[in-house]
Image: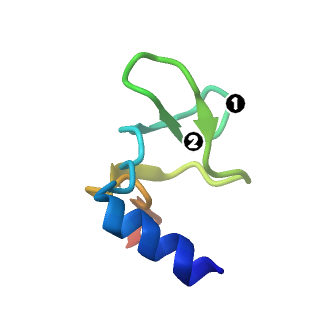
Amino acid sequence: MWAALLAATLVAGSKPKPPAPRVVFADARTGVSQLYSVQPSGRGLAQLTSGGSTDWTSPAASPDGRFVAALHAQQLW
């Protein structure tokens, strides 16, 4: 069933919709540094991390927006 649906989609020429762009950043609004993402319009704020760490820095989204990399305790995550 899934193969037929995929084949029909590919034959029809439709392409998968890329994810909406997101801005990722570190902020200490909760008292400790956390990573967040938000749409460029400012809507859809999402907290990506939790816990007591205070040293998240240099977050960057992958080109397709599916992943985030950041430094934590001078290590790449």
**Measuring 36% from the left and 38% from the top, which residue is drawn there?**
21
| Element at label 1 | loop
SS type, badge 2: loop
Q: Is residue 77 visible?
A: no
In depth, the one of 19 and 13 nearer the eye is 13
> In this rendering, would 9 be left or right of 49?
left
Mark 2 nearby-residue class (10 Å; few <14, some 14–19, many ≥20): many
User: Mark number for residue 30?
Assistant: 1
Vertical order, 65 against 72 (above or below): above
The residue drawn where x is 45% and y is 68% is 8
Query: In this figure, which residue is indicated by the disc labeled 2?
Result: 33
Q: Residue furthest right?
A: 51
Q: Amino acid at mark 2?
A: Ser
Q: Does residue 30 sit above or below 58 in this rendering?
A: above
Q: Residue 6 appears at what percent x and percent y?
A: 48, 73
Q: Residue at x 38, y 52 (%)?
A: 65
| Residue 4 location (% of width, % of height) | 54, 78
| Quadrant assignment, res 9 | bottom left
3 relative to 59 in the view: left or right = right
| 12 up-or-down from 21: above or below | below
Between residue 42 and residue 19, name the one nearer to us.
Answer: 19
- Spatial CA span between label 2 and label 1: 7 Å
Amino acid type at image mark 1:
Thr
Q: Quadrant of residue 69?
A: bottom left
